[in-house]
Amino acid sequence: METGVIFAGFGGQGILLAGKVLARAGMDQGLEVTWLPSYGPEMRGGTANCTVILADEPVGSPIVDAPRALVALNGPSLDRFEPKVAPGGAVVVNSSLVPRPVRRKDVREIPVPVNDIARELGEPRTINMVALGAAVRALGILPLQAVIQAMVEELGERGRKRLVEVNREALARGYAEAGRFLA
Amino acid sequence: MPGKAILSGVHFMNGDEAIAEGAIAAGCRFFAAYPITPQSEIAERLAWRLPRVGGMFIQMEDELGAMAAVVGAAWGGAKAMTATSGPGFSLMMENIGLAVMTETPCVVVDVQRGAPSTGLPTAVGQGDMMQARWGSHGHYEIIALCPASPQEAFDLTVRAFALSERFRVPVLIMTDEVVGHMYERVEIPAEVPEAPRRRPQVPPDRFLPFEPDPDLVPPMACAGEGYRIHVTGLTHDERGYPDMSAEAHDRLVRRLCDKILRFRDEFTVYEAVDLDDAEIAVVSYGISARVAHGALALAREQGIKAGMLRLITAWPFPDPVVRSLADRVRGVVVVELNLGQMSREVERVVRGKVPVIGVYHAGGRIHTPEEVLSGIEEVQRCR
């Protein structure tokens, strides 16, 4: 069983880190994981995405044709990756920035206003963790607690107490938000 | 604050970081480089780590200087490494030749990206494979290893240092952007044996710095140890003095090649996947082999008995391994992220005995298993 997740957005939205936290959480839970980034030569801006694979057997190719979940933090990312999502898969859309709904009817749309939520939390940079929290709920294969732990590990020495706390809140808010759209 | 040299345990690491940690674990204490995507994570990690384990990191003015500094550090007694990507690899070529000629143990990492020129700085390629073999001028042998995962990047970096000391030759790690940037589980063992440098066994007054042992490799004295050394890129005799005769030149160049080729069994490493009953063999290396792995199962679902020879040692090319493969299969598919480099070697060794088909892509993305499968199907149809 192999689960692919694509995180995509503008450079600077933190999507690479969001994917890394998910992959690390999977590794900590004993899964085989890969995390592969894709970005352009720009120092900032541009678009970026990363692919996470969580599997119970060693992963071959680190790219996926049909992700079980997509996290799209901007419009171009939704346009580009929506067609690839596996039927029945989840699409977490940043409804703060993306003006359109998901077009496909065979995927589960989870609109989360991540910019608004992050602003409410007083730390706009946590949009990636809000989105990740929603994705974790939609995937349903890793406990939120494992993802929180991986976030703390990933922030490492940079993770001062306040940062860890606000990112924990962000993950929890995203997780709760997604629950509204999932049975 | 002194740090631990060997970070034993399980890590979530990318290939670049694994190479940096492999180097430190192997005893590397000197790294000179110029930053370049997708190598920068190696330099970044070593800039942080080396000073904490008593080593030295120098960001040089460019890659010419980086390679020169590595040669100098090795002669100063250090285990030394540099790392770059295609554009910098080109600039290193002259001094890689100097390292070959002066029999300087060192490790050079090329994290390959889309090329020629600036090409695709942030995307994958495997277009430097022939440059690794022939990029410096003159005739020479060099050892090149190709990791297919961050774990293997760690393991092969340790091995590269051992081989560089054993043969007194630059050893190249020919990796790529995907292995370099991909994070995975990497397990660092509790202990990593440090490869010894071959030291002089005679007193200084009887020491000739380029007098080889019976296995054609000379012991190495480093600067400042009391042994007289003379190191030059000119053709030289056993004293290290220039000798401009054709005879001396032929003798030296042959020895530099033979010291490696005669002992190729020591370092020829490969992985055989499902080859026992295979009728079609995929030959690949690095990240491309990893993707091709997925195509084998697809082929077998269709009743095609496909296996794979994954080259881990790319140079010297494992002629005997590929030759015996060609005796056993009906066709060969070479998968690589260039328009046919290692496949030239495969064709040379196979000598038309069975059809050889290339699944090529100039880089920018890795293959899909389906692309590899169509190559397997194509060669299956050949008669």
Image (tube, coloured by chain):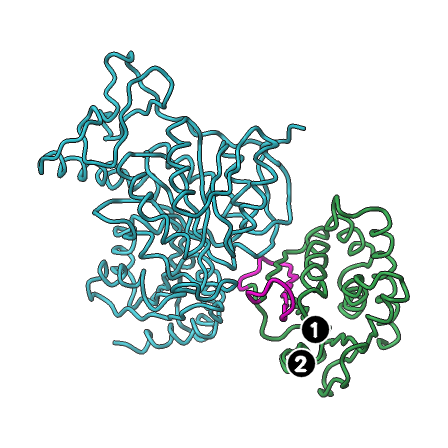
Chain colours: A green, B cyan
Depth order, front residue of B2/B76? B76
The crowding category of the residue bearing disc 2, from other C-alpha atoms within 10 Å (few below 14, some 14 to 19, many at least 20), is many
Left/right of residue B99 with respect to residue A142 in the rendered view: left
Which is nearer the eye, B142 or A163? A163
Q: Position of residue B369 (x, y in %)?
A: 48, 70
User: In this rendering, would A61 be left or right of B132?
Assistant: right
Expressed as whole percent of the image width and height from the top left, the position of residue A36 reads 59, 61
In reply to whether residue A92 is colored magenta, the answer given is no
Q: Is residue B303 above or below residue B158?
A: below
State which quarter of the image contains the C terminus of chain A.
Answer: bottom right
Q: For the residue carrying disc 1, how many other residues have a C-alpha within 10 Å: few (<14), some (14-19), or many (20+)?
A: many
What amino acid does circle 2 point to?
Glu
Residue behind mark 2: A82
User: Magenta span covers which residues?
Assistant: A40-61
Check residue B293 in the rendering and tell me which mark sits there, or answer none.
Answer: none
Q: Which residue is mark 1?
A: A70
In this rendering, the answer to whether A61 lies above or below B184 is below
Q: Is residue B361 left or right of residue A36?
A: left
**SS assignment at label 2:** helix
Is residue A1 among what the camera can see? no
Regarding mark 1 in the picture, which secondary structure is present there? strand
Give the spatial CA distance, label 2 vs label 1. Answer: 8 Å
Q: Chain of mark 1?
A: A
Residue at point 56%, 41% (across, down): B46
